[in-house]
Image: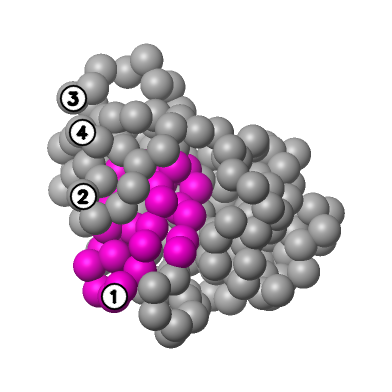
Amino acid sequence: MDDMGRPAGEFSDAYRELEIINRRLGGIRAIERFLPSAPNLLILDVAAGACDVSEALASRSSRRIVVLDRNDQGLKRARRSMPVVGDAMDLPFADRSFDVVMASLVFHHLSNEQCRRALAEMWRLARRMVLVNDLHRHPLAYWSIRVLTGMFSRSVMVRNDAPLSVRRAFKPAELMQLAGDAGVPCQVYRSFPYRLVLVARK
């Protein structure tokens, strides 16, 4: 999925299946459980992909969400959220522009240095909180997603990317170390079934 030169149809198939995965395997719940309950939160979703997490969050409360990604194909799926083309390493907003800055399932696609840069940028923009939802690297998670995608996925991207994503994912201490190196004080929580959520509060 990092190859933006792939055909649009492949991205469309992958986005559709990733929406199902996020809904049924805890991706939306992992973020929602940590969001402040205050009304009219202004949220930035960094590397939003198909925008499905933000669209689900926006449908459940009076949240205003800006979705940012460098691939505009996924941004076209935004309905309740506001799309912006941009790069997670160089976010085009002023300091403290958003109540919450979040990212879902993107950090395992980045190098450690890129993760540190993205975290520092997210921290710069946040007034209240940074949330990073990613995968927990675990043998059972790897074999489970490999079996599930092998049986049910029709997307070439998902069948190849999902098991690889788990292999490239994190242990809690690794996420903590990345945040510490970026100067971002945080806690890392496990979220069922195999998600990790980095929570940094100001």
Disc marking residue 80: none
Q: Assess whether mark 2 and mark 1 are in contact (beta carbons under 8 angstroms).
A: no
| Nearer mark to the viewer, of 2 and 3 | 2
- Return the residue nearer the eye: 152 or 134: 134
Label 3 sits on what residue type? Gly
Label 2 sits on what residue type? Arg
Disc marking residue 61: 1
Name the residue located 34 percent from the left edge and 58 percent from the top edge. 54
Q: Which residues are magenta?
A: 42-68
Provide the residue designation for mark 4.
Answer: 12
Q: CA distance from mark 1 to mark 3?
A: 32 Å
Mark 3 neighbour density, 10 Å: few (under 14) some (14–19) many (20 or more): few
- Magenta residue check for 64: yes
| Nearer mark to the viewer, of 2 and 4 | 2
Q: Assess whether mark 4 and mark 3 are in contact (beta carbons under 8 angstroms).
A: yes
| Nearer mark to the viewer, of 4 and 1 | 1
Vertical comparison of 144 with 28: above or below = above
Mark 1 neighbour density, 10 Å: few (under 14) some (14–19) many (20 or more): few
Q: Earlier in the sequence, mark 1 or mark 3?
A: 3
Name the residue located 22 percent from the left edge and 42 percent from the top edge. 77
Q: Earlier in the sequence, mark 4 or mark 1?
A: 4
Q: CA distance from mark 2 to mark 4?
A: 16 Å
Label 1 sits on what residue type? Ser
- Return the residue nearer the eye: 126 or 152: 126
Provide the residue designation for mark 2.
Answer: 79
- Return the residue nearer the eye: 151 or 37: 37
Disc marking residue 9: 3
Locate residue 24, reporting x and y percent.
Answer: 25, 66
Locate residue 73, reporting x and y percent.
Answer: 29, 30
Label 4 sits on what residue type? Ser
Q: CA distance from mark 3 to mark 4?
A: 5 Å
Mark 4 neighbour density, 10 Å: few (under 14) some (14–19) many (20 or more): some
